[in-house]
Amino acid sequence: DVKVTQSSRYLVKRTGEKVFLECVQDMDHENMFWYRQDPGLGLRLIYFSYDVKMKEKGDIPEGYSVSREKKERFSLILESASTNQTSMYLCATSGQGASNGYTFGSGTRLTVV
Amino acid sequence: SQQGEEDPQALSIQEGENATMNCSYKTSINNLQWYRQNSGRGLVHLILIRSNEREKHSGRLRVTLDTSKKSSSLLITASRAADTASYFCATEPPSGGGADGLTFGKGTHLIIQP
C-alpha cells in the first residue's frame, strides 16, 4: 500500500513564524498535492506538483509556497504564518492516470496563535 | 471554487439501514470519486467512476453517475457503526491524468446509530 506520511499531527506556531509542513510518500507517485480543510468550506487545493522541481498553484496559493526537490517529498511553506492559516492541512499523492484515486496523509492540524 | 456539493449535509440512520448521499457538480469531468474521512484523519479513497460509466459497485458501496444531470449518488447498504464518517465526492477535470488536482465538495456527515 502507498503510504503518505505527514511529519506532524499537531503543530502550534506563532504569528509571523516561518512554518514548514513536510509530506513524504514511499511509492513512486508523480503527483503530490497540498489541501487545507476548514469547517463549512471543505477541502481547497493550495499547490500541487506533477514532477520534481515543478509546482502549480491551486485555488488558494496566497501566503504559501512549496518545494519539491525529491520525488518522494513535497513541502508546504508558510512564509509568515497568520491566524487565518489555522487549519487542517492534508497532503495527497496520485500516480499517472490516478485510476486508484488519491492517497492522503493523516493530516497536520496547525494552530497559529 | 467548489465543484461538488453533497446532499444532505448530515444524515443519521439506524444500523442495518441503507444510506444514500448525493453529489452535484457544475462542469465537465473525467471521473468522479468518493472518499471517506473519519474524525480528524485523512481521507480514504472509496470508489472511482469514470464519465462514461453509469454505475459501479464495490462491496456494500454502489455509485451512480448521471452526466446529463451532473450528479452522482453513493449508496451504502446494510450500514454498520463503523461507517460513521464524513463522505466527500471529488471530481477530476476532463484533462485527466491525475495531475491537476481534484475538486472536493463539502461533505456529508453520516452517523450510524447502533
Image: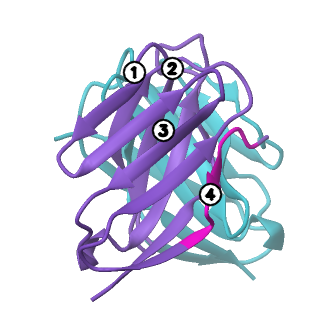
Chain colours: A cyan, B purple
Q: CA distance from mark 4 to mark 2?
A: 32 Å
Q: Position of residue A29 (x, y in %)?
A: 33, 26
Task: Report in which chain the residue with disc 1 lies.
Answer: A
Please check whether the numbered discs 3 and 2 fall on a single chain. Answer: yes
Label 3: which residue?
A74
Q: Are marks 1 and 2 in contact (CB under 8 Å)?
A: yes
Label 1: which residue?
A30
Task: Report in which chain the residue with disc 3 lies.
Answer: A
Q: CA distance from mark 4 to mark 3?
A: 33 Å
Q: What segment is highlighted magenta in the picture?
A: B2-10
Q: Is residue A37 above or below residue B99?
A: below
Please check whether the numbered discs 1 and 2 fall on a single chain. Answer: yes
Residue mark closest to the camera, 4 vs 3: 4
Label 4: which residue?
B7
Q: Residues within 10 Å of mark 1 (few under 14, many from 20)?
A: some
Q: Earlier in the sequence, mark 1 or mark 2?
A: 1
Frontmost residue, A8 versus A104:
A104
